[in-house]
Image (tube, rainbow, N blue to C red):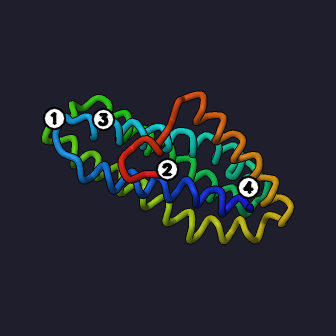
Amino acid sequence: MNIFEALRQSHAVQRQLSALLLKTSGDTPERHTLFQALKGELAVHALAEDRHFYIPLMQHDAGVDLSRHAIAEHHQIDELVESLEETEASSPGWLPLARKLVEKVEHHLHEEEQRFFQMAGKLLSDAQKTALAHDYLKEYDSARAELSVTPEDCPAVG
């Protein structure tokens, strides 16, 4: 497995959780469960991705700007997650805020897969791509276990 395949696995989970979250309404256990699962998935993915994809890309001049942009988007996503945490799930403003989060996540994933992966594919050797996947997955799994992130426990995820 290479780093791109490893990242796409988490991207698929993020997309699935996002779609399910936007179908919820009100202050329900389902909304809380899906939001916590998405929040956790976003956090562990960003942590492992920053360390084992973007920081290594910053070692190349051509990867610096893309990496900074992506890391800045991770920060914007974190801020939207915090805003959702501070908003009552029953509030009429919660779902529009969740939509804004999902739009930002989808934009980031699309940009990453369409632009960043192509640049990284040119900058990294095949051996680096495989080693980064190993390191990313190790960090990702460790962070998931530490935070008890289990999107598979959500309905229709796994």
- The reply, left or right, for residue 40 in relation to residue 7 is left
Of marks 1 and 3, which one's residue comes earlier in the chain?
A: 3
Q: Nearer the viewer, mark 4 or mark 3?
A: 3
Mark 1 crowdedness (10 Å alpha carbons): few <14, some 14-19, many ≥20: few
> What is the x, y in percent for residue 130?
80, 59
> What is the x, y in percent for residue 156?
38, 53
Q: Nearer the viewer, mark 1 or mark 2?
A: 1
Image quadrant where residue 28 sits? top left
Mark 2 crowdedness (10 Å alpha carbons): few <14, some 14-19, many ≥20: some
The residue tagged 4 is: 57
SS at mark 3? helix
The residue tagged 1 is: 90
> What is the x, y in percent for residue 60?
78, 58
Residue in the picture at 18% in, 45% down:
25
Quadrant of the image for the N terminus? bottom right
SS at mark 2? helix
Q: CA distance from mark 4 to mark 1?
A: 42 Å
Q: Amino acid at mark 2?
A: Glu
